[in-house]
């Protein structure tokens, strides 16, 4: 029988871990989304100057585990004069790690926009910045919602690794409860349930945003998409 009373007795510790997990994930994901957009925009705006550095950054993010990046930031940072608290290292690590993946997602979205639209904007005297904000990003947003939602879900799940650098998140606090009570199943089941709820919120938000953007797209684009789907 599951000891539900145990979780209720340890609710303060679990809620503290949930709160730390939530705000670290939120800030880390916002950093990843923002930095990824900047990297993709720089790579497309000036390929000769930024293509190789951004491509190297993306490959590094793909090639190293998040845990190693957290170790470098938290334990290795002081050796080069960079001292971060465990929570800040978690936010920065998630942000830097996720930015590489989001940069590729954004780049794919930008590449899907017909070049004729940008050429027409250039002929009309629209600046590259206004073309990016008013033409490229609105169209790109509808295409990148599904892969971006999947990547956010991955980041939320991988955020459990911040417990290893002593962040008092859900996983670390659940382990503390296990060490105090010698009950293993109840604390980790509670953590699994809370992570599932967070991921469901992310997934539902992604579905809602995708539907909203699809409803706002121009009618001729929707008809073209339907024609491709039926064909």
Image: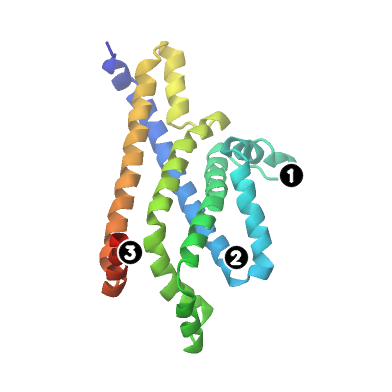
List the residue tagged with mark 1. Answer: 80
Crowding around mark 3 (Cα neighbors within 10 Å: few <14, some 14 to 19, many 20+) is few
Residue at figure coordinates x 37%, y 21% from the top left: 187
Q: Element at badge 3?
A: helix
Badge 2 local density, few (<14 within 10 Å), some, or many (20+)? many
Residue at the (58%, 71%) spot, across then down: 45
User: In which image quadrant can residue 39 be found?
Assistant: bottom right
Q: Which part of the image, by quadrant, shows the C terminus? A: bottom left
**SS of the residue under disc 1:** helix
Which one is earlier in the sequence, the residue at label 2 or at label 1? 2
Q: Residue furthest bottom?
A: 124
Q: Crowding near pointer 1: few (<14 within 10 Å), some, many (20+)? A: few
Q: Quadrant of the N terminus?
A: top left
- Residue 186 is situated, as x and y percent measured from the top left of the image, at 34, 18
- Find the distance from the CA under tag 2 to the CA under tag 1: 29 Å
Q: What element does badge 2 sit on?
A: helix
Q: Judge by depth and name the residue closer to the eye, 150 or 94.
A: 150
Which residue was labeled with disc 3?
A: 228
Q: Is residue 164 above or below residue 210?
A: above
- Label 2 sits on residue: 43
Residue occupying the point 42% across, 30% down: 170
Give how far apart the Cα atoms at labels 3 and 1 are: 54 Å
Q: Which residue is nearer to you in this view: 60 or 94?
A: 60
Q: Tell me, yes or no, whether the two marked residues, 3 and 1, touch with CB atoms within 8 Å.
A: no
Residue 32 locus on image (x, y percent) = 51, 52
Would residue 206 appear left or right of 65 to someone viewing this image? left
Q: CA distance from mark 2 to mark 3?
A: 30 Å
Does the CB distance between marks 2 and 3 fall below 8 Å?
A: no
Quick check: 89 left or right of 184?
A: right
Q: Position of residue 90 (x, y in %)?
A: 54, 40
Q: Quadrant of residue 85?
A: top right
Is 173 situated above or below 32?
A: above
């Amino acid at each position: 029988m599951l000891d539900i009373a145990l979780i209720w007795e340890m609710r303060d510790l679990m809620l503290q871990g949930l709160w730390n997990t939530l705000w670290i994930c939120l800030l880390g994901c916002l950093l990843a989304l923002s930095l990824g957009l900047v990297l993709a925009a720089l790579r497309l705006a000036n390929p000769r100057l930024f293509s190789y550095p951004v491509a190297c950054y993306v490959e590094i993010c793909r090639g190293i585990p998040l845990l190693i990046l957290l170790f470098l930031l938290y334990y290795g940072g002081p050796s080069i004069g960079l001292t971060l608290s465990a929570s800040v290292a978690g936010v920065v690590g998630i942000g830097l790690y996720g930015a590489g993946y989001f940069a590729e997602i954004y780049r794919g979205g930008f590449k899907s926009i017909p070049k004729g639209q940008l050429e027409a904007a250039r002929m009309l005297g629209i600046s590259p910045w206004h073309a990016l904000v008013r033409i490229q990003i609105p169209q790109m947003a509808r295409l990148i919602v599904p892969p971006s939602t999947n990547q956010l879900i991955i980041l939320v799940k991988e955020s459990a690794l911040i417990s290893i650098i002593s962040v008092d998140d859900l996983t670390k606090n659940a382990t503390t409860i296990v060490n105090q009570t010698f009950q293993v199943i109840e604390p980790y089941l509670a953590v699994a349930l809370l992570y599932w709820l967070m991921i469901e919120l992310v997934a539902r938000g992604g579905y809602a945003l995708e539907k909203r953007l699809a409803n706002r797209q121009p009618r001729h684009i929707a008809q073209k998409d339907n024609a491709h789907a039926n064909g």
